[in-house]
Amino acid sequence: MRDFPLNIVSPFPAKPAANGHAAVHIAPIGDGFVFHVLGNAGATEGSLKKLINDIAPELGGALCSPSPHQWFWIGSCEVSQDRFAEILAKLPDGFAMTDQTHGRVRMAVSGVKVRDVLAKGTMIDLAPDVFAVGQSAMTQIGQIGAMITRTDDDCFEIMVLRSFAVSLWDELHHMAAEFK
Amino acid sequence: MTSFRIEGGTLIDRNDVRSFTFNGTKLSGFAGDTVASALLANGKQVVGRSFKYHRPRGILSAGAAEPNALLTIGRDGRRDPNTRATIAELFDGLEARSQNCWPNVDFDVGAVNGLLGPFLGAGFYYKTFMWPAAFWEKVYEPIIRKAAGLGRAGYDPDPAYYEKCWAHCDVLVIGAGPSGLAAALTAGRSGARVIIADEGGQLGGGILAEGGMIGDKPADATLADIVGELHALPNVEIKTRTTIFGAYDDQVFGAVERVQKHLPESAINPDRAMERLWRIVAKHTILATGAEERPIVFGGNDRPGVMMAGAMRTYLNAFGVAPGKRVALFANNNQAYQTAIDLEARGIEVAAIIDPRTCPNTRYQGKARHIAGAMVRDTDGRKGIKSITVRHDDGRDEVINVDALAVSGGYSPIVHLACHRGAKPVWSDQHAGFMPPETSDGMTPAGAVAGNVGIASCFDAGAKAAVAALDALGFSAQPANLLGSDKSDDIRQDIVALWSVPSSMGKAFVDYQNDVTAGDINLAMREGYDHVELAKRYTTNGMATDQGKTSNVNAIGILAENKGVSPGEIGTTTFRPFYTPVSFGALVGASKGFEFQPVRKSPLHGWAVRNGAKFVETGLWYRSSWFPKDGETFWRDSVDREVLNVRSNVGICDVSTLGKIEIFGADAAEFLNRVYCNAFLKLPVGKARYGIMLREDGLVYDDGTTSCLAENHYFMTTTTALAAGVLTHLEFCAQVLWPDLDVRMASATDQWAQMAIAGPKTRDVLSQIIDDDISNEAFPFLAAREVSMFGGRLKGRLFRISFSGELAFEIAVPAGYGESVADAIMAAGKEHGIAPYGTEALGVMRIEKGHVTHAEINGTVTPADLGMGRMVSVKKDDFIGQVMNLREGLVDPSRPALVGIKPKSPSDKFATGSHILNVGDEVSLENDQGYVTSMCHSPNLGHAIGLALVKGGPERYGEEVVIWNGLAGSAVAGIICNPAFVDPENEKLHA
């Protein structure tokens, strides 16, 4: 077997100036995992959390629900294909899971003007006392479907289908341009 | 005498001079001026020409309702026609031009239309242009279209950036006059999230025109205090230059913010929106839009120098502009008298106050002569008013020399936003106007829109409305007291409705913008168009950019008077968004040019770029279409080479855009068995199967392969076009049709980079990167399973499927690895002559093989039509489309069925869409035998080939037909044949 190089290519453009906005900071999140968990009608977030704690406590991460009985299990550590297969094998009948680490990519958007920027795209009310830290919602940013999660005071994480990543990246920069 | 600048003006900064041009003449104004105030200050009385009669027109109002002063502002891409001079803020370098006049606004040839007045009444063109009929399209319509409209849009692209935004609040206050400010302050102090929006550049509304005291403080000081406190409240968002233009369901309001419209070119930030379209979601709305002062319909009421009384007061107090030196006031209400008071306070002579009421306002203590029970019946002057003719109550006429006339016919509450969701306004005799609808629907009118008169009354109403709204929202609030200790404000309206002066001489205009006169309304009534909606359309009253803001109620009043009923019985026309014109730029937002629509990029996009791909837009996807090499100048050169290379060596194609769906659950097999028309219940682990989905009507919906990767785990592929549609369909089936089945699914399209490797040397290439045995014995046709790659460094999914008809595999790897894997395959295949191929070559090869796509699956075909009738299960209990697929019409043996088609002479060509005729038949619908669904040049066969749906289908193999192309006017001899032009025995697939 020849020793071919094997690299992961980011969908985001290499744009060093991308972080140059004073009031808004946009950065790709390259590391971590995204697992799409599909529960049956009786599945709850509580039961899933317990399950994760039982079968993969080292992964940690957070759960964001895009729809009833479905969750994105998102974490910051790397998970090998073999480890994913091990976790999959331990899932009880009520749950199924598919790896979306490469299919749904994430970016962090933060800064004092972050809500002004995101208001140009999403109809979700992101006010601090309405959209709490840890809360997430599926929405449209402009014409692109995405999941927004609030990660800190003025920090949000946006998860988007990989194929739309460049478009959304460009669009966010365009929206943020006035805050340079 | 004309208008001129005087001392004072609360809104202007005399230290900041602004130069601008009007019709090429250089003029100057001050910061804070509107274009209208600056023109008046420079003595420009005639600013435009009327639509039909080209009559000289001056500035009538000081706000959004302006029907006359519509100018074209800017040039090239920044040219804005029909801009209301009364709204446009003056900036340095502004260029304004009059419209609808030639050669200039002072001497307009079109004014000759005035002489044709008797022939240009309401509905004249309905009557005039009836005959000869042939003239309509060739003569009348072109002339009318040329004459129609006022300003003209430019052809240059607008360089500005526009955007759309969302905003949310507990309380939306629409209008920042006294009631709006009081409401916003009350709500802001309570801690509620408040948005207050006003179309003006500054908050204040009617307060800005106040020259005196409010309570115990000067008006401007009171306003400064209120605005200062609002700015200091972090929970209050202030939106100036923002017009709320529409009220929609669920308390969503549309608004347009003119972010940089007031700035000179040099100050425009190109990264900032020129205009911003807002969608504002409110829990409750305070409608503080105020009331529009109405004109009175009398002879010569459109002469420059005739102005609304409130507007005259605004120009006087806010902009320091006097309308003339000798002014008269014609008013039927008490409130308008304040204009006379302010004029006199500024040293302007008020020659007379003409009041049709017999019991006039007793509060007025000024010097002006007070003529009760009288009306203005005519004006005189060429391009500006010189005198008015007053008809006294005893029938005597008196001419009074004036150079300006202030008019007030009462006030029409601005109820538009309260009516956009379908509610109708309610007539009030007391207010002589249509009041907001009684149903609240989350909206509370306050202030002048609700009939309040005077600053104190509006403050009080706004604050109380806010308290009630906040209470319902769960906020504890106290009404803001903005008057201090002095609460004196006892203006009583005491209005007596007057729509039209009966003894008017000459043209008496109801609608200034559309040149609709009282005579036109009366004519419409006589001709049977007496319903308010019919009268509008027959006369054009209330149409165009101002939508009748100054004319509608007068027209309704005239209709009511003539019919002897209340205006309430006549009712209003329908209120619809937009309240005032909104630019197309704002409506489009950022979705233009590069951002017209998002782009979807395959995980192999970068690899394709590096290999020189030409891309084609397929929906939102960019797909590699072909990969030209040096010396290839025509797309077919590349495509032919790519096809031949796959057939003889090996090629690699990006198929990542195909839809991919992961399906899980104990009942997943049963589920698939029901959504596909062919059997899936017993698909073994490690195998793929081609499946056809039917719609409920029995026709084919989509096709693709589904693989069983593990027990209760399937992987479905769909066509690129229907990826989202199929997933939606599956979700519908799972959630609605069969909720009892244990099945769950997720889109995985973006997770996998998938590539087809096809050609006789495929194994030689793949065996260098795949660790598992991929021999025909170990991995036969339609095998599908996870494989180890690169010495165990990566796992991928390998499928032994082929769209090209060659020995082929599709390999799927996590998307991020896609480019590396494709590079590795290219490197491994170098010695075997590998070359990338695009969708064009893929299309050629699938036609050569006789495989169908949505060119054939076009919503009209059954599986049997495609030669796959035997795939439709006759054993299954149920599947989607089962019953309808057996309809008589769908099993008719004469239905067109899939065949191959080729020219009799290899040098002949034909096109997709060509129709098939029997030899010797005339071209007719009855003789149509079918049509070509796909065609290409086959580099393997050296001639054109195609697929077609033809009556009789496979029974006609070998038959000569005519391939007729009506568009190209060609007909070539063709032969019907087996659609599998290449490898009809499928030997390559199983190699």
Image: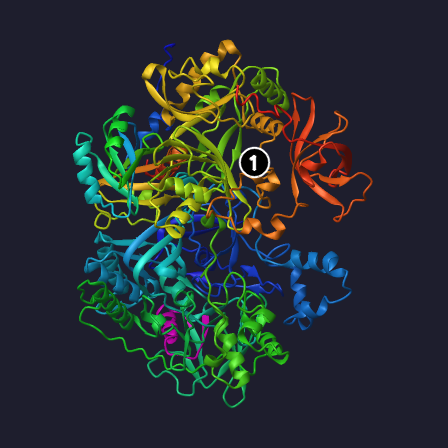
Closer-to-camera residue (B302/B646): B646
At label 1, the amino acid type is Thr
Q: Position of residue B641 (x, y in %)?
A: 60, 18
Can you name the residue that lies furthest to the right here?
A: B920
Q: Residues within 10 Å of mark 1 (few under 14, many from 20)?
A: some
Closer-to-camera residue (B264/B427): B427
Q: Is residue B726 visible?
A: yes
Quarter occupied by residue B408: bottom left
Quarter occupied by residue A31: top left
- What's the residue at 52%, 58% (across, down)? B70
* Magenta stretch holds residue B335: yes
- Left/right placement of residue B969 relative to residue B893 reads right
Q: Which residue is mark 1?
A: B853
- What's the residue at 32%, 74% (across, down)? B452
* Magenta stretch holds residue B44: no
- Where disc 1 sits, the SS reads loop
Can you name the residue that lies furthest to the front here?
A: B875
Q: Is residue A133 visible?
A: no
Quarter occupied by residue B536: bottom right
Closer-to-camera residue (B398/B720): B720
Magenta-highlighted residues: B326-349
Q: Position of residue B206 (x, y in %)?
A: 34, 65
Q: Is residue B583 above or below residue B854?
A: below
Q: Position of residue B871 (x, y in %)?
A: 54, 38
Closer-to-camera residue (B715/B217): B715
Q: Is residue B820 above or below residue B167?
A: above
- What's the residue at 62%, 59% (across, down)? B148
Q: Position of residue B444 (x, y in %)?
A: 31, 68
Pointer 1 chain: B
- Left/right placement of residue B759 relative to residue B266 reads right
